[in-house]
């Protein structure tokens, strides 16, 4: 069968390797992992790879994804729930991350109405300024209310870093979560089972075996798909950065000037045009554009240079390479690139090294 482009190539074996490698590292430190599926829209073939590991939890930010995925893993809703979603949340998620007492009370009612107990992890904002109860607020009052709810079980606390504020997990920062844990446990004579210490940015500590002892869980998306920690953006030794690659086809290849000719205004996205005259170039247009991916989020694998893109066209300086119309070029991707390409209905998915 003739291949169709653009296509995203998904190496299931590399993904399996990344999952197992990091899971072993975490297990050795007494840390359980949640495998985050939202970057690939909970694609079932990738979910099946997770299903074949002994990672305990599968997590997604969208309840729609948790609803449709086939898995026997414990399902976790990552984004704090919308009030309007509580009925679905208690049905399709075993655990949800929460920070609003009003929503937790609604979850309690929804769980009660189907005779279920819903488990929650309370999220704390320890400086990154995204979701979570602010660590300097009177959080014990909220915990007290949560503990009175009959259909809600508080199983742990968590935090999220390096997402909005760019705050890097350090001993000092994470210790704020430890203080919260100790205060809650002492005040209410309970033991919190899960202390979820962040995302792929906390892998920077895990790699060095410097993750604080009280942390026993991490929620991991990017490190599994790109083999990198996100505190410093460093590659994790022995992991693959190419689970996902993009292929796109050359639809035009011509020698043209590098500087536009005529009165210059704005480009297709309303930005003023700005060019450096580099003389005549061998320019290629590929059949993919911003509707599917931003050209800043893809990396060419050869000697060519990405010049820019409009909604349906990606333009490259092909330098001295010898190519033809119809040739296919391969690109590596960053996180945003994978996210957008896996969300686009125009991108074919090709699964490599089926398990
Ligand atoms: C609350 C939460 N935890 C963990 C993650 C995973 O983050 P990362 O992909 O950096 O590992 C995300 C994002 O997907 C998230 O929103």
Image: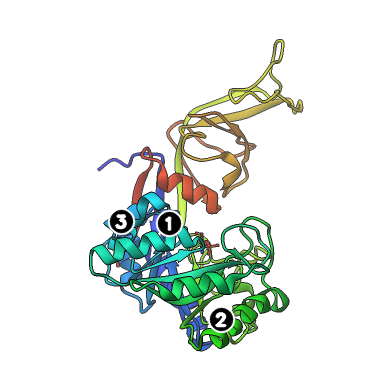
At 57% across and 40% down in the image, what residue appears?
295
Badge nearest the viewer, 2 or 3: 2
At which x and y percent is residue 229? 60, 67
Q: Earlier in the sequence, mark 2 or mark 3?
A: 3
Up/down of 326 relative to 170, above or below: above
**Distance between mark 2 and mark 3 Cα atoms:** 29 Å
Q: Is residue 37 left or right of residue 110?
A: right
Residue 43 visible to the viewer: no
Q: Earlier in the sequence, mark 1 or mark 3?
A: 1
Up/down of 115 relative to 106, above or below: below
**Distance between mark 1 and mark 3 Cα atoms:** 10 Å
Q: Secondary structure at mark 1?
A: loop
Residue 121 visible to the viewer: yes
Q: Residues within 10 Å of mark 2 (few under 14, many from 20)?
A: some
At which x and y percent is residue 110? 30, 60
User: In this orientation, which residue lies closer to the viewer: 134 or 294?
Assistant: 134
At 31% across and 74% down in the image, what residue appears?
52
Q: Are marks 2 and 1 in contact (CB under 8 Å)?
A: no
Name the disc covering residue 88, or none: 3
Mark 3 close to ligand 1, CB under 8 Å: no
**Distance between mark 2 and mark 1 Cα atoms:** 23 Å
User: In this orientation, which residue lies closer to the viewer: 45 or 56?
Assistant: 56
At 30% across and 60% down in the image, what residue appears?
45
Name the disc covering residue 81, or none: 1
Residue closest to the far top: 263
Res 214 quadrant in image: bottom right
At which x and y percent is residue 182? 60, 85
Q: Which residue is mark 2?
A: 184
């Amino acid at each position: 069968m003739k291949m169709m482009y653009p296509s995203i190539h998904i190496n299931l074996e590399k993904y399996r390797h990344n999952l197992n490698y990091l899971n072993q590292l975490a297990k050795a430190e007494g840390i359980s992992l949640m495998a985050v599926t939202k970057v690939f829209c909970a694609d079932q073939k990738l979910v099946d790879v997770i299903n074949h590991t002994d990672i305990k939890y599968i997590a997604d930010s969208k309840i729609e994804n948790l609803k449709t995925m086939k898995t026997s893993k414990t399902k976790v809703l990552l984004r704090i729930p919308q009030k309007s979603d509580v009925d679905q949340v208690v049905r399709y998620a075993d655990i949800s991350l929460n920070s609003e007492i009003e929503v937790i009370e609604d979850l309690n009612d929804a769980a009660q109405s189907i005779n279920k107990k819903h488990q929650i992890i309370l999220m704390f904002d320890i400086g990154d300024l995204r979701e979570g109860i602010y660590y300097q607020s009177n959080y014990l009052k909220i915990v007290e209310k949560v503990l009175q709810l009959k259909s809600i079980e508080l199983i742990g606390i968590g935090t999220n870093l390096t997402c909005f504020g760019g705050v890097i997990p350090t001993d000092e920062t994470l210790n704020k979560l430890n203080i919260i844990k100790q205060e809650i446990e002492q005040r209410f004579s309970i033991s919190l089972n899960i202390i979820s210490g962040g995302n792929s940015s906390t892998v920077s500590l895990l790699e060095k075996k410097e993750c604080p002892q009280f942390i026993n869980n991490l929620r991991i998306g990017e490190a599994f798909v790109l083999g990198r920690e996100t505190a410093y953006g460093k590659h994790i030794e022995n992991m693959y950065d190419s689970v996902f690659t993009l292929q796109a086809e050359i639809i035009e290849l011509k020698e043209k000037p590098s500087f536009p000719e005529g009165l210059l205004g704005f480009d297709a996205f309303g930005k003023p045009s700005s060019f450096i005259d580099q003389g005549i170039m061998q320019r290629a247009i590929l059949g993919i554009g911003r509707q599917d991916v931003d050209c800043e989020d893809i990396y060419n694998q050869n000697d060519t240079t990405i010049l820019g893109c409009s909604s349906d066209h990606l333009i490259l300086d092909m330098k001295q390479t010898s190519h033809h119309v119809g040739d296919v070029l391969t690109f590596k991707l960053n996180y945003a690139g994978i996210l957008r390409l896996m969300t686009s209905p125009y991108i074919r998915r090709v699964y490599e090294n089926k398990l």
